[in-house]
Amino acid sequence: MTYRTLYPAIEPYETSMLDVGDGHSIYYERSGTPGAKPAVFLHGGPGGGISPRHRCLFDPALYDVMLFDQRGCGRSTPHANLDANTTWDLVADIEKLRALAGADRWLVFGGSWGSALALAYAETHPDHVSELVLRGIFTVRKSELDWYYQFGASEVFPDYWAEFVAPIPPEERGDLRSAFRKRLVGDDPVAQIEAAKAWSLWEGRTISLLPDRATSAGFEDGHFALAFARIENHYFVHHGWLEEGQLIANAGRLRDIPGTIVQGRYDMACPARSAYDLHQAWPEADFRLVEGAGHAFNEPGILHELVEATDRYAGKIG
């Protein structure tokens, strides 16, 4: 089998900042062909930011793609800020960007946290979504958060886990998300950056099936780690401002939206159970469970399915 890969590198045809209120300005960029099929890319984390590689998931001749750094991360300002930074603030931001793009409906592409945000957006505004492409399904359920941040993935990566929990005294490890929050929002800058790097690197090391230094290296950068850890922890302590199981319970609202779910069988960050549960609630979606793959979007089998999906929804392949 010949795997599909990313389209060649491309520069945006437009970049700017959008004042979305509440003191936040978000960086956005548009790439591809102006006036072609509209799409929006929702990055992971939350707090991860966009990458030039994300532009290359779409055929630039067939798509007009909006990419943006969500509140507080990437080139959006203020950096690492948690005020007015919730799932529903981001859903409102996506609507502002859709209006700016002049799109009545657009394809919504989201991976990891981006899949949760895509679901929240699509279930709120189904009439504005032409298709959904979701990867590494995450729905912010307590079981998902506990697996990755309390007990579960810890048993697969005991060496990385030891470094993850190192900033937290043993007596506080019964609730690691709260223990990290105390340090990430505290006044001690040394403890803050130590906690941020431990939190960030835990994810960077565990999202690929096999160790990948190129993937994990960026998670060690202090500037990146501060926004990534603070925002991610902020969202997870508050369970994404969602009712337990809400995104799957409301999946019936997606029935009329063509969709593709791409999931790595051995995804340690977002185990396949959530993708399976979503597909049971949304059986109309095309479910691609990729063997021999973890979480990262650039794992060969996952990347193949993502590019095939964007091509298919642009009418490039049957």
Image: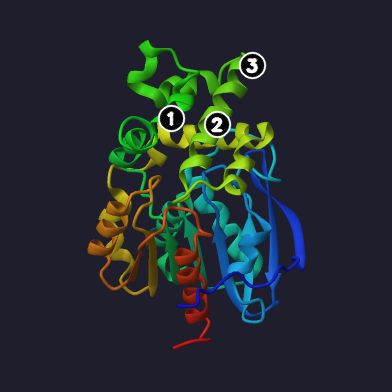
Given the image, on which type of amino acid does mark 2 rest?
Arg
Q: Decide which of 115, 191 is in the foreground and name it.
A: 191
Q: Are marks 2 and 3 in contact (CB under 8 Å)?
A: no
Q: Is residue 64 left or right of residue 89?
A: right
Q: Residue at x 30, y 53 (%)?
A: 274
Mark 2 surroundings within 10 Å by alpha-carbon count, few (fewer than 14), some (14 through 19), many (20 or more):
many
Q: Which residue is mark 1?
A: 159
Point out the tag, 2 or 3, that comes first from the N-terminus.
3
* Callout 2 secondary element: helix
Q: Nearer the viewer, mark 2 or mark 3?
A: 3
Asked if disc 3 and disc 1 are in contact, CB closer than 8 Å, the reply is no
Task: Name which residue type carries label 3.
Answer: Val
Decide if residue 80 is on the left or right side of residue 285. right
In this view, 85 is above or below 120: above
**Residue beneath label 2, please?**
230
Q: Which mark is residue 189?
A: none
